[in-house]
Image: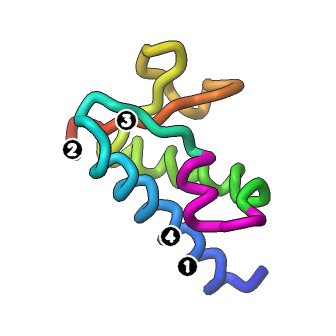
Amino acid sequence: MALEARGDQRARLAAAMRALLRHRRPDATICPSDAARVAGGASWRALMATAREVAAELSARGTIVVRQHGEDVDIAAATGPIRLARGPAW
């Protein structure tokens, strides 16, 4: 995949995460797959690893927090399903 296309994809994923969270209650969460579906359409599954990477970047900025079982976690240490929520720098 061309570098430019990867950058566009990452930007679309980040924008989708922010938009999905913006249109939900302040305490609601989304699944990274929700953003992948918005950004990738029928081939959303191929974006899941990138979606987690983008979530990690947004989490590092404080834009979002990553949760498992209702608790904030470090995405680098998280295995299995995660949820994304508005962060302290929202």
Answer left or right for 39 relative to 70. right
Residue 8 x/y as whole percent = 55, 79
Q: Is residue 57 magenta?
A: no
Residue wearing tag 1:
8
Mark 4 vs mark 1, CA separation in Å: 6 Å
Q: Is residue 38 magenta?
A: yes
Mark 2 vs mark 1, CA separation in Å: 23 Å
Question: Which is nearer the N-term, disc 4 or disc 2?
Answer: 4
Residue type at the position of mark 2 = Ala
> Residue 12, labelled with which disc?
4
Depth check, front residue: 53 or 46: 46
Question: Which is nearer the N-term, disc 4 or disc 3?
Answer: 4
Which residue is found at the position 37% from the left and 35% from the top?
85
Please say whether residue 47 is visible from this viewpoint.
Answer: yes
Residue wearing tag 2:
89
Residue wearing tag 3:
85
Residue type at the position of mark 1 = Asp
Query: Mark 2 Cα within 10 Å, few/some/many (few <14, many 20+)?
Result: few
- Which span of residues is magenta-colored? 33-43
32 versus 78 height, above or below? below
Mark 3 vs mark 2, CA separation in Å: 11 Å
Residue 86 appears in which quarter of the rendering?
top left
Q: Nearer the viewer, mark 1 or mark 3?
A: 3
Answer left or right for 5 relative to 15. right
